[in-house]
Image (cartoon, helix red, strand yellow):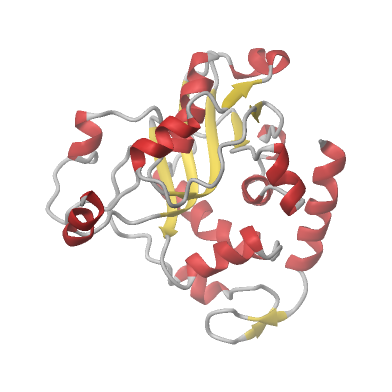
Amino acid sequence: MLNLLAPAAKRLSALCCMPSACRLCGTWQSQSVCEGCVKGTTLSARRCHRCGLHLKEDAIESICQSCEDYPPEMDAVVVGFDFVPPWSSMIGALKFRSDVALARVLTAPLAQAIRQSDPTGRQMPDLIIPIPLSASRWQERGYNQAWLLAHQLARECGWLNRLHHGTLIRRQETGRLMQMQRDQREARIRHAFAVQPEEIHRVQGQHVALVDDVMTTGATANEAARVLLQAGAASVTGWFAARTPAPKLGQRERAAQ
């Protein structure tokens, strides 16, 4: 696996240093998106501590009612930005068009959000684990976008020794989950992950950070968290570049029809 990951990391490092025009404002500089546009990402909005969805402005609690009623497997979720344009198109380019240079800019708002969520650094994870791809998806893309994000994040924050890509594996193909409803996703993803037997000792008693590009319903990340907790992890936090916003009332009603 290391032989497969090394070329992607090397390519990412090289591309991140090449001059280019900012994808958002067009300013000529050394990154895919300039620092000004990254800093302009809205991080001030309050989010639910457990699922990452926006809270109402007048909300008293830090956890939404849905998470109070049905607690997710993850203890906490940190999100860089909402999965909306132009960020959604950049994630699509990273994921489906091999634009790996975008990993750096997509992790910048997430790194900032992580620091804001824990200013003292006392709750930093012992392990950083990317959501794994199936073997067929590896062959199709040639890389795992979650690993690229996790690697860039760990490198930026000085946590490379905490990054472990082979601890969690995807043991079955689930197909594309993007168009499925929540209950369909949960059924399809159930038992899709496993902790490598020789890695169980590494997980036991540890605080784990799971990294992925987008959290939509949370079915995938919560199943991965369930497996890690079952293997003995003390807690699991989800780190996501983007969070799909909750559908508006009219959209929820149409989806239920």
Which residue occupies the extreme front position in the image? 257
Instruction: Check the image and report above or below for 52 versus 242.
Output: above
> How many numbered dots are placed on residues in this image?
0
Which residue occupies the extreme right position in the image? 3
Identity of the residue drawn at 42% across and 30% down: 187
Identity of the residue drawn at 49% across and 43% down: 239
Q: Position of residue 24 (x, y in %)?
A: 53, 80
Q: Position of residue 205 (x, y in %)?
A: 54, 15
Identity of the residue drawn at 63% across and 20% down: 195
Q: Position of residue 158 (x, y in %)?
A: 67, 44
Instruction: Check the image and report above or below for 195 versus 250.
Output: above
Q: Is residue 164 left or right of residue 60?
A: right
Q: Is residue 66 left or right of residue 93?
A: left
Identity of the residue drawn at 53% across and 22% down: 228
User: The N terminus appears in which quarter of the rendering?
Assistant: top right
Residue sitting nearer the eye, 40 or 23: 23
Instruction: Check the image and report above or below for 145 versus 206.
Output: below
Q: Quadrant of residue 249?
A: bottom left
Q: Is residue 198 left or right of residue 221?
A: right
Q: Position of residue 35 (x, y in %)?
A: 56, 72
